[in-house]
Amino acid sequence: MKIDPTSPDLSAQIAKAIRDAIVAGDLIVDERLPSEAELAEQFEVSRATVREALKRLAAQSLIRTQRGAFGGAFVNRLSFEEAYGQQITTSTLLLSMNEVSFDTACEARYALERACAPLCAQRRTADHLATMRAEIHRQGQQGLSDEAFCASDVAFHRALVDGAGNPVLSYQLAGAVEAMQPLMNMITFTARNRSEIIALHTGIADALEARDGAEAERVLERLCACTQSLGSAVLAERARRKTDG
Amino acid sequence: MKIDPTSPDLSAQIAKAIRDAIVAGDLIVDERLPSEAELAEQFEVSRATVREALKRLAAQSLIRTQRGAFGGAFVNRLSFEEAYGQQITTSTLLLSMNEVSFDTACEARYALERACAPLCAQRRTADHLATMRAEIHRQGQQGLSDEAFCASDVAFHRALVDGAGNPVLSYQLAGAVEAMQPLMNMITFTARNRSEIIALHTGIADALEARDGAEAERVLERLCACTQSLGSAVLAERARRKTDG
DNA sequence: GACATTTAAATGTCTGACAAATGAAAATTG
DNA sequence: CAATTTTCATTTGTCAGACATTTAAATGTC
């Protein structure tokens, strides 16, 4: 592991060197890195610089640190939980900062969910189905705020994804679904909208109960179209207000 | 933005405070943060601590820094490129550290790709098709190493995903496909394996050329099964050697 | 043997300093 | 006056040294 001491951003270089070692498997899970003082000696930099490098790695959950004797920095086993969190932050920012259209985000989300449908139809447990039915019931309650409706929507779709029984898929989709929430929260749902969505959700749950993946896919496609038209209606309304007022 | 100065990990708290401000939109893209000295004063910590916090944010591409007068830390517009990179690192580690089975990873990958098939059939350009054909041709060349074969495979599937014309999908899938590569590289492909895969790739390209998304999905499913059986054969072989030798 | 104390090692934090980069402003020059 | 050069203040990058705090092993004590 070598760095170029002439070019700036030594801490970034050191972080990269260590990160590469972890990704390549030279440093294995739970292995202890040398102490900050030792790393400083090895890389011929100050301890402050080493610490900046370690903080970069900690921000990516690549290492964890422990104080005290026999403490230090350890290679962290990246859990699905931690990975979720990072993916959601990244995806949310990506969507909010890059003027990704509602349509594009929506299309991506439902395309990914459609991918789960056949697997979920095969493998969903009674638990997954119960969660979906419970969320559908909540969505039908009077006086539910738009935010709460959206949150329930996320929970419903989360159950659908988890029903596929593939943690990698769950991880991938968590980002897409959760990152959409800020965009979805723009929408105000009329009672009519809600009952339409609830009907489609019910259709999905029914299809999954009958283990009919193809039907679930078809309903998901209708739900996608429905959501997209809702979104474009909201955007059109905003544009109209802007020109008029 | 406040922190608790008694509990340790001040830099993590400061990083969180700033990150929250960015995610919430209180700090907008290209906005300049206060200088390190000013932040140190605001949070009542030393400059070193502030710097550790800023490095954490830089590791997540949330800020970029610039030296010199009128330099400083700026809220970074998270590009798709940067997001790709982070997702690939995260996904790769997640797969390598969590004993995700080859089957599970494979299933997730092909499920996601199948989601792109109909969109790609609609929107693919001649360019995408040309890339696919070129990669298929490369895959048929004599004396191609297994690594090169895998790399070409990734390029082929990348073209398929990009053909869907949805940057969010491309971003999501880049992680899944690239993170699989270390697992795929375990496999040694016989000439017979290769010609089978090439035939399926050709089938996909043909279907997309004919804008037949359903057919593309069907071939992808066969490719998934083919890859999974290849993987399990390799694993079985390894297990046998372990017991015997 | 069980419990209290000491101790060494490690991270967390602070202070103060200097180097290097950088763009604005001032000074110089044609 | 315009173009160029120089100066300069600001800001990040890096360093050295110090002290506080945490932690678990080692030691001492009953």
Image (cartoon, coloured by chain):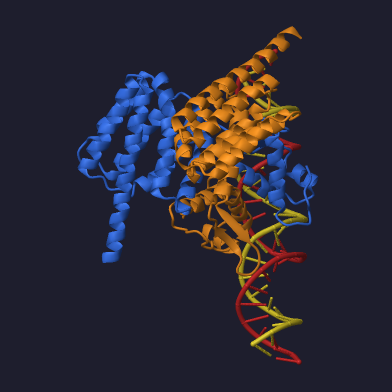
Chain colours: A orange, B blue, C yellow, D red
Work out whether residue A182 can be spotted: yes
- Which quadrant of the structure image shows residue D28? bottom right
Asked if residue A240 lies left or right of residue A104, the reply is right
Which residue is at a point 60% across and 34% down the rendered structure image?
A179
Depth check: give the residue in front, A103 or B48: A103
Q: Nearer the viewer, residue A90 or A227?
A: A227
**Relative vertical location of residue B33 with respect to residue A98 in this rendering, above or below:** below
Q: Position of residue B22 (x, y in %)?
A: 69, 36
The one nearer the camera, C19 or A123, is A123
Q: Position of residue A89 (x, y in %)?
A: 61, 39
- The answer to whether B156 is drawn above or below residue A45 in the figure is above
Q: Position of residue A184 (x, y in %)?
A: 64, 27
- Residue at the far top in the pictured view: A244
The x, y position of residue B126, in whole percent, is 35, 19
Image point 34% across, 23% down: which residue? B208
Q: Residue at x 43, y 43 (%)?
A: B179
